[in-house]
Image (tube, rainbow, N blue to C red):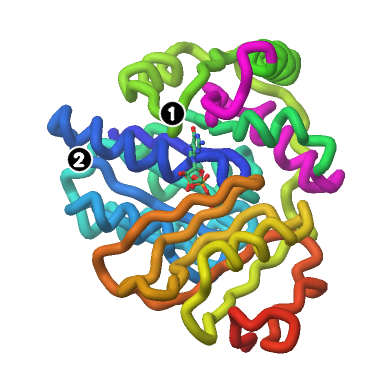
Amino acid sequence: MIDVYLLSGFLGSGKTSLLLHTIGQLKEQGKKPAVLMNEFGTLPFDSDAVKGEGEVPLKELLDGCICCTGSEKTEAQLQGLLEENDDIDVILIETTGVAHPVEALDAIYSPLFADRLDVKGIVTVVDSRRWLDRDKLSPQIRVLFMEQIRHAHLLLANKSDLLSEGEMATLTMELTNFNDSVPIIQTIDAKVAFSFIEKVLNAPKIISDKPIQSGKNLPLSSKLLTFSDSVDREEFERWVKSLPDSVYRMKGYVPIKGVKNPFLFQYAYGMVNWLPEYVKMEPRLVIIGEGLENIRCDKVVNPFFVEK
Ligand SMILES: Nc1nc2c(ncn2[C@@H]2O[C@H](COP(=O)(O)OP(=O)(O)OP(=O)(O)O)[C@@H](O)[C@H]2O)c(=O)[nH]1
């Protein structure tokens, strides 16, 4: 049987960080991991990161959500992984940050694979700072955020480097109130020993009868922007900071003035992250959030982009 782990968590919480770290550990143990990746938005940024890890079988579900695009697509991708690779030990499924974890699990429980896949459960990565400020989220998005926590079998209180000790204690207490039957561990960059995940998810679980509040029909959308020219980094960051709180996530390749290759740019809950790229990636940016139609990116208001 192939062990299957579902990685859940809100947009930008640290799922890809957990995925990459876990792949590294599995390889060190001589195991062969495979990945099924689901992204909200049309560009496979996170998959690019997995491809950078070397030979890891990978299937993508783009521009939708594993729990909403229908189980047929998920089944087809899983089937593809299994047919093309007969030596997989573990499948790691990274859901989009807007997937309901139980609905995503349902998509994986298919009679087609019942004798091949052993679904171990859900690891939810929590953006600790966002949790403390969750009241700023719109009601529907907040419900989803809570659902990802309520239905987890293991909780990672990630980005603990951004919290004081007092805030961390509050966070742990509040998370326990939401899901009191699972371990909660504090992490930075979602670093956790895979042996610990295995141990926790292999332990007998209390069968959950928690009702599900659906994550379908969320008021979220994504926008793909193409750069008109190279940008001044500080000016660009000023624009990013001026965006409303309802912009939850941005990722892409940003061309910086005077630098050869576009930088990998990440934004999640007020934090920006830049990483130099050694290959020339196409300069474009995906924005995910609510009310994006109100964010004008035409040349008059914002000279960075050519809006399509
Ligand atoms: N300060 C800090 N930043 C972190 C930590 N973990 C992740 N990040 C940053 O947060 C951003 C998002 O991390 P990812 O691992 O891509 O998050 P994700 O959940 O996969 O994002 P989506 O797939 O878009 O939902 C990146 O810029 C990471 O470098 C952490 O523990 N501390």
Q: Is mark 2 within 8 Å of ligand 1?
A: no
Helix, strand or loop at mark 1? strand
- Is residue 141 magenta-colored? yes
Q: Residue at x 18, y 49 (%)?
A: 86
Residue 76 relative to residue 233: left or right: left
- Is residue 157 magenta-colored? yes
Q: Residues within 10 Å of mark 2 (few under 14, many from 20)?
A: some
Above or below 226: residue 290: above
Q: Residue at x 28, y 33 (%)?
A: 1
Q: Residue at x 32, y 34 (%)?
A: 22
Instruction: Give the magenta range.
Output: 137-166
Q: Nearer the viewer, mark 1 or mark 2?
A: 2
The residue that disc 1 covers is: 120
Q: Residues within 10 Å of mark 1 (few under 14, many from 20)?
A: some
Instruction: Say which quarter of the image contains residue 148.
Output: top right
Q: Nearer the viewer, residue 253 or 172?
A: 253
Above or below 37: residue 235: below
Give, as a three-letter code, the residue at label 2. Answer: Lys
Residue 261 relative to residue 252: left or right: left
Q: Quadrant of the C terminus?
A: bottom right
